[in-house]
Amino acid sequence: MATSRKLITLDEFTIQQTREFPKATGELSALLRDISLACKLINKQVNKAGLVDIIGKFGATNVQGEEQMKLDVYADEALINVLRNSNDCAGIGSEENDNFIAFEDEYSVNSKYVVLFDPLDGSSNIDVNASIGTIFAIYRRVSPLGQPCTKEDFLQPGNKLMAAGYVIYGSSTMLVYATRLGTNGFTLEPSIGEFCLSHPQMKCAEKGKIYSINQGNSRHYEKGMLDFLDHCMEINKEEGRPYSHRYIGSMVADLHRTLIKGGVFMYPGDKKSPNGKLRLLYECNPMSFIIEAAGGLSTDGHGRVLDIQPTELHQRVPIFIGSKDMVNKVLEYIGASETVAE
Ligand code: AHM
Ligand code: MG
């Protein structure tokens, strides 16, 4: 198909952005390139997931007697290997590993950045061919250069993030990433193997009509949360109908829709799990950074998710995230004393 519009690759885009900062060294752009490479490798394997009857189930032994690696383990190893070989990453923290990993070679110890990631979020959706994703968060390290990175480099609040993003392995594969300059989306163009700018300066609508939550857990919810759900199911004066409920059970996919169409995504704390399910450092923080850079809000019910000082690599946090109006409405219902923005 002929097009007059020049394709802008992720690489070209980040280099252009770097020019806005005369002191920038290009390391962040290089790191993004490395992460996007790992995600292309993951994408290739995710695309084969439907062939389980032919090549053997992931985690089972294939016809050659080799063990097929589980996709989430494959994704974790792909990211670790690419980042270990990169010159721009001092260490990683991953959902799949109990502890962070400090890379100890001479290049890595002099790298400025650490990366936290959930290599394959929503992996229970693989069997049903629903969208899954990789989430990543990039911090500038606080420990001195020249030595391996430390736990403190990873336990930074989200308001210190340099960049964050996700890749959604959906009907097309997209990489969405945010810096303080905004949130931009890139679609993988398979014929050239490059992520190309397709969704410049993404904005999360101020008002939404969709609520997204695992409502099956509602027997454990507190009263305020139940009242908000009742509010969503009432006939809305402006819409003339209740809000729509959409829940894929894959945070990346549910939040990608929320970013594009507006709405609110919630994983609250409840009587059974006071801190909810989702992890602060590699799920809630990067997603909050992306949604806030697109004009939305994210709160744990008391304040900004991004202002929480982490204490553990794998800590969980309740989250209410999406369109400003809807997030502020949830806060009214759950009786929080403060709203998170004007
Ligand atoms: P995972 O990291 O084990 O894949 O779990 C995280 C996923 C999120 O993608 C999703 O929002 C949530 O778990 C769904 O949980 P539930 O099945 O309890 O609704
Ligand atoms: Mg996860």
Image (cartoon, rainbow, N blue to C red):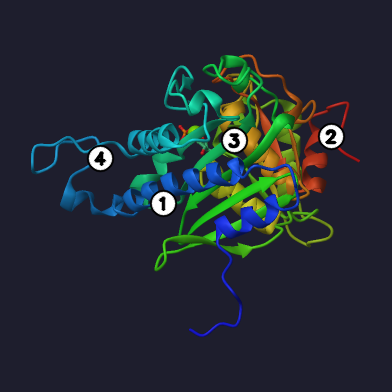
Name the residue: 48% across, 48% down. 36
User: How many numbered circles does the render carry?
Assistant: 4
Task: Name which of mark 3 and mark 2 comes first in the sequence.
Answer: 3
Label 2 close to label 1 by CB (< 8 Å) = no
Q: Kindly report which numbered mark, 4 or 3, lies closer to the viewer in this rendering.
A: 3
Q: How crowded is mark 2: few (under 14 residues within 10 Å), some or many (20 or more)?
A: some
Q: Distance between the residues labelled 4 and 2?
A: 43 Å
**Residue type (three-letter) at the residue carrying disc 1:** Lys
Residue where numbered disc 3 is placed: 137
Q: How far apart are marks 2 and 1 (CA)?
A: 36 Å
Point out residue 79 in the picture as x, y percentages from the top left corner: 42, 37
Residue beneath label 1, please?
40
On the image, numbered disc 4 is attached to which residue? 58
Which residue was labeled with disc 2?
A: 340
Q: How far apart are marks 3 and 2 (CA)?
A: 22 Å
Q: Quadrant of the C terminus?
A: top right
- Tell me if the residue at label 4 has its CB under 8 Å from ligand 1: no
